Amino acid sequence: MSLVIGLTGGIASGKSTVSNFFKEMNITVVDADIEARLAVTKGETAYFKILAEFGEDILLADGEIDRPKLGSIIFHQVEKRQVLNDIVHPEVRRRMKDKVETAKKNGEEVVVLDIPLLFESKLTYMVDKTLLVFVDNETQLKRLIARNNLSVEDAEARIHSQMPLSDKLRLADAVINNNGSVEDTKKQLLEILAQFGINKK
Ligand code: ADP
């Protein structure tokens, strides 16, 4: 029996910090952003579909997809964004499912799916438990500005483009409050894992 945990948060809430704690415990973390990048590399199913849809103009000299160029096309054309999502999302889900299956076959007790848009993309069916990394607005803004070297306006715009963390609170099975120290966050993570029946040090 393996437990599949869906890890989520908001920008600069501390999701990567928690994800690293899982990795330090030798728990497999499947990162949706990484899988989305891998899914469109040369030779993959989504690669050929994107090429058929968007043409060879979106290729780099080495034959890989020019992701910034593709990003710019879909930024300006909403219907193209939908087309791209319809190509890429099923592949990302398939890749994540495969990795979970492999971890289960290997007898791993816990597998983590790190999915930034876990709730927004309605992917909770893929996991047994959802875990939210939460911070208050002020801390989120301060940490985002410090990490990405942004102006207050830019940082606020990025935060406001996402579902508020406060809305995600009531959707999550467990919440880590990451306003305090990283040590305190680790302690909360271990307590939550224990509640889920997983004992780690
Ligand atoms: P996310 O992956 O959710 O975007 P990160 O884990 O990268 O967030 O954290 C955002 C920033 O805040 C990083 O610079 C990180 O080092 C810092 N950070 C995260 N948790 C804490 C904490 N508890 N105390 C101080 N700084 C933190």
Image: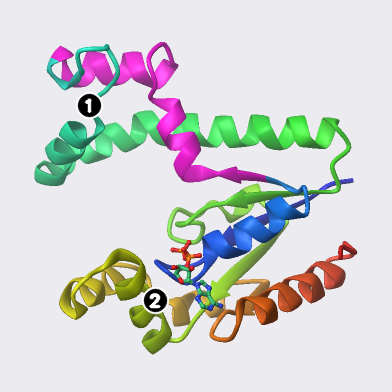
Q: Is residue 84 left or right of residue 54?
A: right
Residue 198 at x, y = what percent?
Answer: 87, 62
Q: Main secondary structure of the magenta part?
A: helix
Quadrant where the C terminus sits is bottom right
Q: Is residue 21 left or right of residue 148?
A: right
Residue type at tag 1? Asp
| 51 within the magenta span | yes
Residue 170 falls in which quadrant of the image?
bottom right
Residue numbers of the magenta segment: 29-56
Residue highlighted by disc 1: 66
The residue positioned 68% from the left and 78% from the top of the image is 183
Residue 141 at x, y = what percent?
Answer: 33, 80
| 33 within the magenta span | yes
- Tell me: is circle 2 under 8 Å from ligand 1: yes
Residue highlighted by disc 2: 143
Residue 64 at x, y = what percent?
Answer: 30, 18
Instruction: Answer above or below: position of 27 versus 171.
Output: above
Is any atom of residue 152 visible in this view?
yes
Q: Secondary structure at mark 1?
A: loop
The residue positioned 27% from the left and 22% from the top of the image is 65
Q: What mark, if any, has residue 185 been given in the picture?
A: none
Residue 104 falls in which quadrant of the image?
top right
Residue neighbourhood size for the residue with mark 1, other residues' Cα within 10 Å, grouped as few (<14), some (14–19), many (≥20):
some
Which sits in the foreground, 69 or 150?
Answer: 150
Which sits in the foreground, 111 or 170?
Answer: 111
